[in-house]
Image (tube, rainbow, N blue to C red):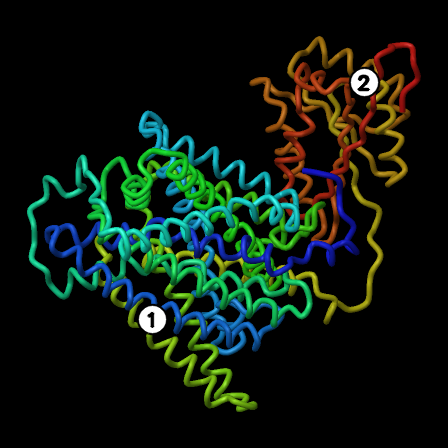
């Protein structure tokens, strides 16, 4: 993925505010491409007249954006080394709540990649309908591309992603500005022609409070990705917290303008959710036709939606590092790769998102009901943790800060309950079951690490003791140079060496005995009969007999002679008996297994070692 970077170069991987906005805000900003559509998708069930409710619903969501944004502004300055929901909950609410927040975030980041890239492909298929049948496959290709780019390193991926992000922002703001100019000074906006609304064959229902709440919960996908900046504070250039706070407020302002602008234009042009065309595409088509400006907006939308997954690729590995550091995820998730990124976390995220896309066939409407549930769980726990922090520390301005975070926690919890109730049957139940399951897995991993640490600890170990000469068993398949080299090594370990040969043929067995009497240097040879021609079973049975006779602290050392062909494909032409024996003994106590390789060369007359 590029030349390795020294650890000392990590300072050069820090991000400016301009680059950080593209990396950490692409998820939140890209949500405007489908948040309005999700609101209309619910409201159209009550008829076209109900679509007018989209504007007050959008205003309510914009208010929630401001509340959550300022709450996370507090979090950034309280945790300048990274203050995601997992860190805040762990510090203030305890392990269980931290794991719930962590599990919700991990799943949400996977959904971020799946939803963003699927929505980006939907923008492409709106422009090129002939690609619609291949949307899931195209989405997986998009995941692979973003995964590879992120493996190149934080700074390099930020440089790549900055251009499409800012093209999208300029494109959407230009669309909104042009639409407002036409609405104010040119006699209104043209009405878009709708080919096939989504609810054509669905019986209309009345406008009820439940319907409005469902539409509100659907539009709350506009809040996804807001936490990303607080998670990634350490990625900013110094002063980290100050730069992260400014970037957060800038993102909130741009997000609100774009979200309200698109919702307003959708209501004015009469855009309706369509099976084959997005609402944003309908707005662009009604204002620009099929000209170059429309194409630019669609391409920019597709790119930002695909690259919005970069927010998750920036935060999922970082969260995985924090959780692996605390012993709740495999240690490998905390390894810093050659390019100074957590490459294992990046790879895992790409694989998990691809599986999810293929399972749901790249349909964003099937993925989105699960999306917001985990997001608002983490929102709520993060804000509750901050309230607890202010009440515990009572530092300067603690009362004001506690009030801000209290409003944030109450608001996000209320929205979480609305989303859970209104979207439970549409897929939210999956998250309700999945998050506790993930938490149990995390606890089991942590328990494993605790058991390993306890058994490896030197506390109460006592005085070290010398091991007696081990009993060495050397399985052989014949008598040749490789076996004799292994025999020399085995005798250097202990005088108690036994060679073991599995006899599947009387003729071959007699030949092995004859050669061993000549070359075995007096070492005992045991021939095990194998009437059914099995190699592994007689050796394991023989070792079990030795186990029954040995003392509790005795060790049996198994030396495995193994010749290594000069070409990799040469291994395919030989039995892998040594590998099978090694695997069979891997989980048995009281054994040490040693490979003694004998490397062959291309020339049969050349000496080898």
Under circle 1, the secondary element is helix
Marking on residue 479: 2
Discs 1/2, front: 1
* Mark 1 neighbour class, 10 Å CA radius: few under 14, some 14 to 19, many 20 or more: few
Q: Nearer the viewer, residue 567 or 498?
A: 567
Question: Which residue is found at the position 7% from the left and 54% from the top?
Answer: 205
Q: Nearer the viewer, residue 332 or 425?
A: 425
Q: Is residue 392 left or right of residue 270?
A: right
Q: Is residue 66 left or right of residue 183?
A: right
Residue hosting label 1: 63
Does the rendering let one see residue 111? yes
Which quarter shows the C terminus? top right
Q: Could you tell me residue 100's position as x and y percent?
A: 43, 65
Question: Which residue is found at the position 83% from the left and 23% from the top?
Answer: 599
Q: Is residue 508 left or right of residue 184?
A: right
Q: CA distance from mark 1 to mark 2?
A: 82 Å
Q: Could you tell me residue 582's position as x and y percent?
A: 67, 35
Does the rendering let one see residue 426? no
């Amino acid at each position: 993925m590029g030349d390795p970077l020294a650890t000392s170069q990590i300072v050069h991987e820090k991000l400016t505010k301009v680059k950080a906005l593209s990396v950490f805000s692409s998820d939140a900003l890209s949500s405007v491409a489908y948040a309005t559509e999700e609101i209309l998708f619910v409201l159209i069930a009550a008829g076209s007249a109900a679509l007018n409710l989209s504007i007050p619903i959008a205003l309510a969501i914009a208010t929630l954006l401001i509340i959550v944004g300022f709450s996370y502004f507090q979090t950034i300055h309280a945790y300048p080394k990274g203050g995601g929901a997992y860190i805040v909950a762990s510090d203030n609410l305890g392990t269980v709540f931290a794991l719930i927040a962590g599990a919700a975030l991990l799943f949400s980041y996977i959904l971020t990649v799946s939803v963003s890239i699927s929505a980006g492909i939907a923008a492409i298929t709106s422009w090129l309908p002939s690609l619609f049948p291949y949307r899931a496959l195209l989405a997986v290709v998009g995941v692979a591309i973003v995964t590879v780019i992120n493996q190149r390193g934080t700074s390099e991926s930020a440089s790549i992603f900055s251009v499409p992000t800012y093209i999208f922002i300029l494109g959407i703001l230009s669309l909104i500005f042009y639409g407002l100019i036409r609405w104010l000074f040119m006699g209104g906006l043209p009405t878009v022609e709708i080919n096939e609304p989504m609810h054509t064959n669905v019986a209309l229902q009345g406008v009820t409070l439940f319907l409005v709440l469902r539409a509100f919960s659907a539009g709350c996908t506009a809040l996804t990705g807001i936490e990303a900046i607080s998670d990634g504070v350490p990625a900013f250039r110094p002063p980290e917290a100050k730069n992260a706070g400014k970037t957060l407020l800038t993102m909130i302002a741009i997000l609100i303008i774009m979200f309200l602008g698109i919702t307003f234009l959708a209501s004015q042009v009469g855009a309706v959710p369509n099976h084959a065309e997005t609402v944003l595409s309908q707005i662009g088509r009604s204002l620009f036709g099929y000209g170059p400006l429309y194409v630019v907006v669609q391409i920019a939308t597709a790119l930002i939606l695909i690259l919005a997954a970069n927010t998750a690729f920036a935060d999922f590995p970082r969260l995985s590092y924090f959780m692996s550091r605390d012993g709740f995820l495999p240690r490998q998730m905390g390894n810093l790769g050659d390019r100074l990124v957590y490459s294992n976390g990046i790879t895992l995220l790409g694989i998990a998102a691809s599986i999810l896309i293929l399972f749901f066939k790249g349909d964003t409407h099937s993925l989105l009901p699960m999306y917001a549930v985990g997001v608002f769980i983490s929102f709520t726990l993060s804000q509750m943790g901050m309230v607890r922090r202010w009440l515990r520390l009572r530092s300067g301005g603690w009362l004001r800060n506690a009030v801000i975070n209290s409003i944030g926690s109450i608001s996000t919890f209320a929205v979480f309950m609305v989303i859970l109730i209104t979207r439970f049957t549409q897929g939210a139940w999956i998250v309700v079951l999945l998050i506790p399951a993930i938490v149990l897995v995390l606890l089991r991993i942590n328990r494993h690490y605790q058991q390993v640490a306890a058994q490896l600890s030197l506390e109460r170990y006592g005085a070290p003791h010398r091991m007696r000469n081990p009993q060495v068993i050397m399985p052989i398949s014949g008598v040749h140079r490789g076996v004799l080299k292994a025999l020399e090594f085995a005798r250097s370990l202990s005088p108690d060496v036994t060679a073991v040969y599995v006899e599947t043929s009387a003729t071959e067995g007699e030949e092995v005995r004859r050669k061993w009497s000549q070359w075995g240097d007096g070492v005992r040879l045991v021939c095990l009969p194998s009437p059914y021609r099995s190699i592994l079973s007689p050796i394991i049975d023989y070792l079990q007999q030795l186990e029954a006779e040995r003392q509790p602290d005795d060790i049996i050392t198994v030396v495995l002679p193994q010749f290594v062909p000069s070409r990799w494909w040469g291994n395919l032409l030989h039995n892998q008996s040594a590998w099978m024996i090694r695997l069979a003994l891997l989980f048995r106590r009281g054994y040490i297994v040693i490979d003694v390789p004998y490397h062959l060369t291309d020339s049969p007359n050349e000496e080898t070692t």
